[in-house]
Image (cartoon, coloured by chain):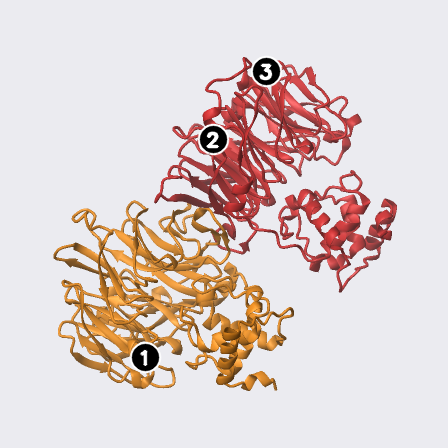
Chain colours: A red, B orange
């Protein structure tokens, strides 16, 4: 038994304080010993818990690099302490919040002081081995097999359960639980809305047919080891025909048949930052949206600081090319959404920038400075009486909702200018959402370091551009949960928020009236564990936000 | 002193024979010892002599992989023997031909049985450090500073001298010797013809101004460590404006300012074979040509089996994109040229295929099976009385010039069909060339294993489609030289061939009458050492071949 394994938190904190106060650098020449088994365990833990911010290669991105050369200067005790307690800049307290055990922290610290493993590449043959069609397209129904209003279904990610719940947006009843990849990052509706495309952080894509009774996974494939984005083809004539998966590792995007998820094309994304700079092997694919102007997807390459327009019009035709138009944007691209019909706004979050992309011209129309670490999700659109059409983002790092003019033709004087920086009470925002039938922008703060902040939701007045009201969701704090991801039902009458707790205890989804802000309902049940993102079919298929 | 170092060739050959006859596998568990200094020496030798075929990563391409896992089964003696004596499939006899010393062979064998070095990547900053403008564009003359017929200049690569000789095609006099990168692979004329762009195997690009008196290098840059191709922008309105370098390592293409060679864009080429297959980190850039249909280059990615159309119309305009249209072709792309005005033909040499690319539609128009290992250079175009416009390639591995119909509109029944396989007396062809004013295709065979073949040139009848006459270039065999690369002067009256000898002894360039085949002249001088490729300004700028 390793004596480290039962070291108590207090000891770790003491070590950290000692290291900081004394300025002691525990320089190590030889890396600490680690068994093959521990190394393998740590590799998986790292992949699940750390790679998102620090990169599969440990080369850094949102978080700093975790190469042993740098960490060795800090020493093993310091590394353990940081893993345990987190850091103000965004590093979560893995020990204090019970995400990692003390044993796991010990193994992880030694892992980080040893050389990183060389992560595997992937080939088409390997992807094909993971491809399964459970119901062939010709065996699928030609009309819905139930009488439910499937366009008002809400797909709810049950993050740590490896499941997606299909919930009826009209009745609030659970329609079905479907097994998917691990820790689904997003659901995207196909153009027709009939299918949900789910992508797991483990790289598994699942195609869910909402016309089945009950809705079920009809095809799946695992085109990578780590992924965050998926999108369907939406240009007229190509509805539901193709699907693209954006991978975090390996660095690639994979185009799939939209009906079967059969892999068709692999597009490597490793390259040079902004078309001329340092080489980035780990150039990860962040947000993807389907263009309405051309048969193409807008694909954001995070560490490359480039946005690629990937044309899918000639796939599968022998001898025809795949055109990719590469636009330099900035670092590090994360998420974004449509501002009006024509402009796609993506956050370059390490520079606090919003990059405004003209999807018709395939050009960069503007750069706007948001708050600290903008995290728009898809953002929020509405028409302001003075400024005309506007678009807003939340910010992870500052108490600000940033609102900018988004109508260069009708309101050129405000276009891509910040028209308001609305103060909110907490940092730690992940998502905001609005609907034309609601006077409010709903705004979460699940990453707030304050326990009160992490269970608070705010309603922001779309005309006054002020925070109207913020409240803690009753019962959420008691569950040690975080309140996350406002989503409207079809028609915008209700807004739902997830109470994201531990997988060991059921939590709930709270439903508010989108106008009066009154609580209408709580969606509860033993199945409601670790709910996070929620996606209404109609709103998702039609880019309503 | 290492006893291996003075091992004699006979001993090596005996070891090889023993290994083959006895079927003995010298399996080794530990790699042989090698000092840091030896490893460094071998790394450089490998890069200069082996990487071209076996890849900078030793992962194989034209030659097999050279990973220690595979070679260890063969044993050190076997490896030394192969390096010394070569193999029939194309591996040169490095020892027997005096390319490597016995000491070097010993070091190389031990190097190959150890893990390969991780080759360095490159950044824009590193490239900028190598960039030098010797004469700024505004300081250059606005008209030629000499009375020579510069459009009939011939740039002669002096391969092992790191020089290019500018020779007057009219008088046969040396105009100037200019220092360039090591082992220049090709010269390409800018659209106006005023500049030669030279690219060295060491990755150095040099811009030579033919209007200076004497012609001189006015700018240089080293965008990579290993390169093979360079091309200028030639679309109307973009003449002489941009230059692109195709690198072998790192895997990228770099776009430069055409007047100063300032680096503008870096395009990574690592990716997936044919858009869906294995990942190739070492996806090298083979032949590049400028399109006449669009402001773009046609860039062949060897190991990826893809041909990219790289649009240069919006470079340097902020917020504008770089469109790249990716066409799947096949493995491994090498060299090629225009068949008529519209079609670009590139060899996929490991499959003995010619890929016919429609540059107007950006599609793959046809695949044609050539001889063994087609090596077209730029190929040869003429109009045949029966078959109409045809295009021909030589083949490295078979005694055949392959001729195919190249006029889908006027002669559809012959288009992209082989109309003749003309027998030639030797394998080992590298280049063939013709001109509308000559009745012959001139055809070399410098890689012939036969000493007679390597100094022979053939004239092939363009109408009869038969080899009319082959002859040994007098004096070449005595120099231990190879006869290589026929090139016409402007107007097609003369054809020049290089007598490629050792750098220690001057050789010569032989000049023939392009109609009568009589020897007209020999271009001689102390400077004529290791002449290889020759590029007439007018013919190169105007794609006359």
Q: Secondary structure at mark 3?
A: loop
Q: Is residue A466 above or below residue B289?
A: above
Q: Is residue B502 above or below residue B190?
A: below
Q: Quadrant of residue B429?
A: bottom left
Circle 1 residue:
B451
**Residue beneath the point at 48% across and 45% down:** A266
**Residue beneath the point at 50% across and 17% down:** A144
Q: Position of residue A10 (x, y in %)?
A: 87, 46
Q: Nearer the viewer, residue B259 or B107?
A: B107
Q: Secondary structure at mark 2?
A: loop
Circle 2 residue:
A259
Residue A212 as seen in the image, left or right of residue B201: right
The span from disc 2 to disc 3 (Cα, nearest Å) is 32 Å
The span from disc 1 to disc 3 (Cα, nearest Å) is 88 Å
Circle 3 residue:
A493
**Chain letter of the residue beneath label 3 in the structure image:** A
Given the current orientation, which residue lies at the most extreme front position? B22
Q: Nearer the viewer, residue A333 or B289?
A: B289
Q: Earlier in the sequence, mark 2 or mark 3?
A: 2
Q: Quadrant of residue B182?
A: bottom left
The span from disc 1 to disc 2 (Cα, nearest Å) is 61 Å
């Amino acid at each position: 038994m390793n004596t480290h394994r039962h070291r108590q938190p207090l000891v770790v904190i003491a070590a950290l304080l000692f290291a900081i106060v004394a300025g002691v650098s525990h320089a190590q020449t030889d890396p600490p010993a680690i068994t093959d088994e521990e190394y393998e365990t740590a590799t998986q833990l790292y992949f699940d818990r750390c790679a998102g911010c620090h990169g599969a290669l440990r080369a850094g991105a949102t978080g700093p690099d975790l190469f042993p050369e740098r960490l060795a200067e800090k020493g093993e005790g310091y590394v353990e302490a940081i893993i345990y307690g987190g850091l103000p800049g965004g590093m979560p307290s893995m020990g204090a919040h019970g995400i990692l055990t003390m044993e796991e922290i010990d193994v992880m610290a030694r892992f980080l002081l040893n050389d990183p493993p060389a992560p595997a590449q992937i080939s088409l043959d390997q992807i094909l081995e993971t491809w399964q069609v459970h119901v062939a397209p010709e065996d699928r129904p030609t009309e819905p097999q139930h009488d439910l209003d499937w366009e008002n279904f809400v797909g709810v990610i049950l993050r740590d359960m490896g499941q997606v719940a299909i919930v009826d947006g009209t009745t609030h009843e659970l329609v079905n639980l479907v097994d998917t990849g691990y820790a689904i990052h997003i659901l995207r509706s196909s153009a027709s809305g009939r299918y949900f495309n789910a992508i797991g952080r483990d790289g598994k894509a699942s195609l869910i047919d909402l016309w089945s009774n009950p809705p079920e996974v009809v095809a799946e494939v695992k085109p990578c080891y780590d992924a965050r984005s998926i999108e369907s083809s939406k240009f007229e004539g190509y509805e539901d025909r193709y699907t693209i998966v954006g991978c975090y590792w390996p660095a690639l995007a994979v185009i799939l048949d939209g009906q079967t998820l059969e892999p068709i094309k692999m597009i490597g994304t490793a390259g040079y930052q902004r078309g001329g700079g340092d080489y980035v092997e780990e150039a990860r694919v962040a947000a993807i949206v389907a263009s309405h102007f051309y048969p193409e997807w807008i694909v954001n390459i995070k560490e490359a600081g480039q946005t690629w327009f990937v044309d899918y019009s000639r796939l599968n035709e022998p001898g025809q090319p795949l055109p990719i138009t590469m636009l330099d944007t900035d670092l590090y691209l994360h998420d974004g959404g449509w501002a009006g019909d024509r402009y796609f706004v993506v956050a370059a979050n390490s520079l606090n920038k919003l990059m405004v992309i003209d999807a018709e011209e395939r050009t960069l129309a503007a750069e706007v400075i948001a708050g600290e670490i903008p995290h728009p999700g898809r953002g929020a659109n509405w028409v302001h009486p003075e400024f005309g059409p506007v678009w807003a983002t939340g910010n992870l790092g500052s108490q600000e909702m940033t609102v900018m003019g988004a109508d260069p033709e009708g309101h050129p004087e405000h276009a891509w200018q910040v028209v308001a920086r609305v103060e909110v009470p907490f940092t730690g925002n992940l998502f905001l959402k609005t609907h034309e039938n609601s006077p409010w922008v709903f705004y979460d703060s699940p990453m707030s370091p304050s326990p009160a902040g992490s269970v608070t939701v705010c309603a922001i007045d779309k005309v006054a551009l002020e925070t109207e009201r913020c409240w803690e969701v009753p019962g959420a704090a008691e569950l040690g949960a975080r309140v996350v991801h406002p989503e409207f039902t079809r028609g915008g009458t209700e807004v739902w928020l997830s109470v994201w707790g531990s997988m060991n205890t059921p939590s709930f989804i709270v439903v508010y009236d989108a106008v009066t802000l009154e609580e209408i309902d709580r969606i509860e049940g033993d199945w409601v564990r670790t709910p996070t993102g929620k996606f209404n079919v109609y709103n998702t298929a039609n880019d309503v936000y």
